[in-house]
Image (tube, helix red, strand yellow):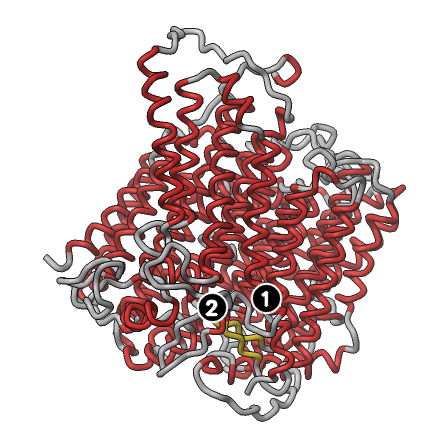
């Protein structure tokens, strides 16, 4: 049971990459990138978890209560912002490509087509 | 050892461009004329000055600066450290110089998006400085990501079909690379629970046989190699650098790609050096990848008629040479890497600027279409020939110092065959650029069917900038590349390399002492630069002098050039994102098989 | 490569990578039992050192505030890049006519939708502001609150007309707000240096633990981030919604 989080992270990564390789629509490909990113969230958060711990908020608890690792949660927050911004950029690029080429099929989008 | 009064300069190379960028975003709409350009140039020059001062101050000891005042307490590193070493400060100063040159070159170029170009470029500059100086693994990722995001946005500026598709390929491949880096950070943290380089190295020394440590290095390395365009992760580069606006391509090829490779060196020496399996991986797999990249990049270069795509492939090739230098242990090869980094960046930057001049003044970028049309732009022609000779391995200048030192380090380990890849790569790229110069500016080398346009779109760039303004940064860069006093360069980079290797990693957790100086080694195989430049001249002459060659020779060479090897290279770079990701998987498989072997051998 | 070739190659690579993944999974320290000295050091000492009770905020805006600076500027760069990409072709003039897809019917905006949006918009914005203000006490922060507020303003478009959305959401204003947020964060870094402290060092009075105003510089950084994130996401929504308008004659190419 204790291998499950890591197996999930590896599975998400694999599924996401499979989706990118076989994608026929760029918006679908961007969604697959989000799936790959979720793999990193699962991996990071699972490392910081400890059984029997609470969230690292000590508003109504004494400081000595065992809590999970706040550093990893801060890292995941940064990760989420990274994902959101890159997704916005990719979607904007896809919109413009659709206007220029009329297609968003990755297999038909080749720069310097010979 | 910290020089306390000096430390206040350390965060400024990052903070000042960020402040200037944010300020330009705030008021850029209201500033008249060329004031944003002036602010950008001044900021870049200021960063050069600060970095030079930091380099001078770090001669007696690295400058360790803890952000937020979080000095380590009780052996636990709570905050993020910047450790400025002479080597890193030199690289930082060089990159800021390249930015300043690019801003001068782009004077008046980006009129229709107000100051947005300068905002993005200034944030890009700050990210590169941060990436260079940081001593924290996640902070490295953050600056890597800032660099990536600004690069993605700048690539697609022209909003034509080719730049958009190139930007999409660039973004998707590099984003997968960032996720791999995050996975590597996660694995490293799971073992050690620290993020500071010095503390990581100390902790990894106790986990030296753990496969998780090797896996962490592999994921970090692959992420950085994707950005650094090593085979088989390099496919995005030709698509992206060829379509980005010229001032931006200058930075991409001159600074961003080599910096990612240097980042790999940084995490290797500062963090993962205590792990024996990783050492073995660097000396075998990474060396092999570097050699393959150098050769394949050079061969792909020969087939290109789109000038910027040709230069992009030459960046791939020279990146391979840098990777060779990084994979060899010792201060000699690292010194060579430093000199080569700076030399190559200067030369490649000036070449992309010349490509921009051709786009703006001659109205095209296709080498065959441009034949002879460069004649009125003869100063650019002279510059291009000088740059081509430097690229092709001529025995003068910074690039030559670099490749000589790397070659000497390889020969000292008995791996002389490494030089073959370096010679081939440099000769092919130098020869291709020389051929381009001869064709465009002298009108040599007519080819049947050249009137038909190449496969790229009609391209041109903003034409009303004066030639002298565009040639000014080109000349400055080439003069610096030709080098200040060659003998001093060798000693300077060797000293910087030796100091970096001995004290950069642990300096955040323990005081260090000045290491002994390294003697400049004698040069073995001094015929190598001459052989390289001769081969480059031969390649150029062969293409330019086709009219005077016997018919049978021409048929044979045509058959080779469209034959299986070159054809396969062309077909592999087909621009489809699914194929690129499959190549990435192949690279991942390579790394996992090699790591398994390295762990068993260690 | 054909699709089949790609899948075959990917399959071979997966077979080669799988053993490495399995070995790594077996060797990672056991889930739920990791020793976490870094996290523990922060958990134990922060309430006394900085008077805040949300450890994640303390890490984000104090211990590792430099990361947040980079992340914030990355958001600014990405929003700027998206603006360049979307505005570049269109220019900044906005058209009012919605684009019509040939085979889709256009429905009237229902009054129920308008009512629901009018009820929920102030609630969501208030909740977002609450999340921003309580960053140092309970789960929340500039990023989270900013995203909530920005998403809330979308209800303006959903419930009212596009015209009202454009009139209330001015791109120039949000451009400047976003830049102002970024400048606040950089000045939080440079400010302490003027007095001889380190970059981003928390030098403001720390206040009382558990009060709304505690944490010193954390509050200012939090406000800067909230401003920049809100403005940035609203700008993104603005530009993407612009794409739903009919193209002007001179940009159909």
Per the rendering, the mark at residue B509 is none
> Relative to residue B560, is residue A59 depicted above or below?
below
Please name the residue shown 72% across and 61% down the image.
B97
Side of A2 relative to A99 (left or right): left
Q: Nearer the viewer, residue B94 or B214?
A: B94
The residue under label 1 is B422
The residue under label 2 is B287
Q: Nearer the viewer, residue B334 or C187?
A: C187
Q: Secondary structure at mark 1?
A: helix
- Check the image and name the residue furthest to the left: A1
Residue B348, horizontal then vertical, whole percent = 69, 56
Residue C40, horizontal then vertical, whole percent = 27, 71
- Does the image show residue B171? yes
Alpha-carbon distance for marks 1 and 2? 12 Å
Please name the residue shown 38% across and 30% down the image.
C122
Q: Do marks 1 and 2 both belong to one polypeptide chain?
A: yes
Side of C83 relative to B98 (left or right): left
Q: Residues within 10 Å of mark 2 (few under 14, many from 20)?
A: many
Q: Secondary structure at mark 2?
A: helix
């Amino acid at each position: 049971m204790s291998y499950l989080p890591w197996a999930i992270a590896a599975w998400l990564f694999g599924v996401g990459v499979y989706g990118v390789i076989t994608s026929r629509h760029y918006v679908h490909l961007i969604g697959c990138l989000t799936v790959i990113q979720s793999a990193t969230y699962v991996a990071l958060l699972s490392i910081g978890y400890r059984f029997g711990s609470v969230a690292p908020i000590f508003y109504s608890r004494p400081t000595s209560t065992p809590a999970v690792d706040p550093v990893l949660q801060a890292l995941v927050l940064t990760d989420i912002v990274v994902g959101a911004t890159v997704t916005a950029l990719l979607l904007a690029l896809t919109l413009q490509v659709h206007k220029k080429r009329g297609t968003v099929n990755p297999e038909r989008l080749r720069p310097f087509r010979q | 050892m910290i020089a306390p009064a000096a430390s206040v300069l350390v965060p400024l190379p990052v903070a000042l461009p960020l402040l200037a960028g944010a300020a330009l975003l705030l008021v850029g709409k209201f500033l008249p004329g060329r004031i944003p350009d002036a602010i950008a140039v001044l900021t870049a020059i200021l960063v050069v000055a600060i970095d030079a001062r930091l380099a001078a101050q770090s001669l007696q000891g690295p400058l360790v600066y803890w952000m937020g005042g979080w000095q380590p307490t009780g052996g636990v590193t709570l905050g993020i450290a910047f450790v400025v070493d002479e080597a890193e400060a030199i690289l930082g100063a060089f990159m800021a110089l390249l930015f300043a040159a690019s801003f001068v070159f782009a004077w008046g170029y980006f009129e229709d998006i107000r100051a947005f170009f300068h905002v993005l470029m200034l944030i890009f500059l700050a990210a590169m400085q941060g990436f260079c100086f940081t001593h924290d693994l996640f902070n490295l990722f953050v600056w890597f990501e800032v660099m990536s995001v600004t690069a993605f946005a700048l690539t697609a500026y022209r909003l034509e079909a080719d730049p958009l598709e190139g930007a999409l390929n660039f973004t998707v491949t590099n984003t997968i690379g960032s996720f791999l880096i995050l996975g590597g950070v996660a694995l490293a943290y799971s073992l050690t629970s620290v993020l500071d380089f010095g503390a990581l190295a100390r902790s990894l020394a106790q986990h030296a046989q753990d496969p998780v440590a090797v896996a962490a290095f592999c994921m970090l390395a692959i992420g950085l190699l994707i950005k650094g365009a090593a085979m088989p992760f390099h496919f995005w580069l030709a698509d992206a650098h060829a379509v980005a606006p010229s001032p931006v391509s200058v930075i991409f090829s001159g600074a961003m790609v080599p910096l990612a490779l240097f980042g790999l060196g940084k995490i290797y020496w500062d963090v993962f050096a205590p792990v024996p399996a990783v050492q073995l991986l660097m000396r075998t797999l990474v060396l092999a990848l570097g050699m393959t990249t150098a050769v394949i990049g050079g061969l792909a270069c020969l087939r290109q008629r789109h000038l910027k795509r040709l230069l992009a492939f030459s960046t791939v090739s020279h990146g391979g040479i840098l990777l060779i230098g990084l994979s060899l242990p010792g201060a000699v090869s690292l010194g060579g890497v430093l000199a080569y980094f700076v030399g190559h960046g200067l030369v490649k930057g000036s070449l992309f600027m010349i490509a921009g001049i051709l786009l703006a003044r001659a109205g095209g970028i296709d080498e065959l279409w441009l034949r002879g049309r460069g004649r009125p732009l003869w100063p650019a022609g002279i510059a291009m020939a000088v740059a081509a000779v430097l690229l092709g391995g001529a025995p003068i200048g910074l690039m030559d110092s670099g490749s000589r030192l790397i070659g000497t380090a390889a020969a000292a380990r008995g791996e002389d065959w490494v030089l073959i890849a370096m010679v081939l790569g440099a000769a092919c790229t130098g020869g291709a650029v020389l051929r381009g110069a001869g064709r465009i500016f002298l009108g040599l080398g007519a080819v049947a069917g050249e009137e038909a346009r190449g496969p790229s779109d009609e391209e041109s760039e903003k034409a009303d900038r004066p030639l002298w303004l565009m040639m000014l940064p080109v000349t400055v860069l080439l003069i610096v590349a030709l080098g200040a006093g060659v003998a001093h360069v060798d000693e300077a980079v060797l000293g910087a390399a030796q100091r970096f290797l001995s004290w950069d990693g642990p300096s955040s957790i323990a005081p260090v002492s000045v290491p002994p100086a390294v003697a400049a080694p004698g040069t073995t195989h001094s015929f190598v630069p001459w052989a390289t430049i001769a081969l480059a001249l031969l390649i150029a002459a062969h293409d330019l002098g086709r009219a005077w060659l016997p018919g049978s020779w021409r048929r044979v060479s045509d058959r080779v050039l469209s034959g299986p090897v070159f054809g396969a290279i062309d077909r592999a770079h087909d621009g489809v994102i699914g194929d690129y990701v499959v190549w990435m998987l192949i690279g991942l498989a390579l790394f996992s098989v090699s790591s398994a072997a390295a762990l068993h051998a260690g | 490569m054909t699709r089949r070739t790609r899948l075959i190659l990917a399959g071979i690579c997966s077979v080669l990578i799988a053993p490495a993944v399995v070995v790594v999974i077996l060797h990672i320290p056991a889930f739920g039992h990791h020793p976490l000295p870094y996290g523990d050091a922060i958990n134990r000492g922060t309430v006394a050192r900085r008077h805040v009770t949300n450890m994640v905020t303390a890490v984000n805006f104090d211990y590792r505030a430099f990361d947040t600076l980079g992340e914030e500027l990355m958001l600014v760069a990405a929003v700027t890049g998206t603006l360049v990409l979307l505005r570049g072709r269109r220019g900044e003039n906005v058209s009012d006519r919605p684009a019509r897809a040939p085979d889709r019917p256009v429905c009237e905006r229902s009054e129920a939708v308008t009512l629901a949006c009018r009820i929920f918009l102030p609630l969501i914005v208030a909740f977002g502001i609450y999340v921003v203000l309580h960053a140092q006490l309970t789960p929340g922060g500039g990023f989270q609150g900013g995203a909530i507020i920005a998403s809330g303003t979308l209800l303006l478009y959903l419930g009212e007309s596009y015209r009202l959305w454009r009139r209330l959401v001015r791109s120039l204003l949000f451009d400047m707000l976003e830049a102002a947020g970024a400048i606040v964060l950089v000045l939080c870094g440079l400010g302490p240096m003027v007095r001889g402290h380190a970059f981003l060092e928390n030098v403001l009075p720390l206040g009382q633990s558990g009060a709304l105003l505690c944490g010193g510089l954390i509050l200012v950084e939090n406000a800067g981030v909230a401003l920049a994130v809100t403005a940035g996401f609203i700008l993104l929504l603005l530009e993407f919604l612009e794409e739903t308008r009919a193209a002007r004659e001179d940009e159909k190419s």
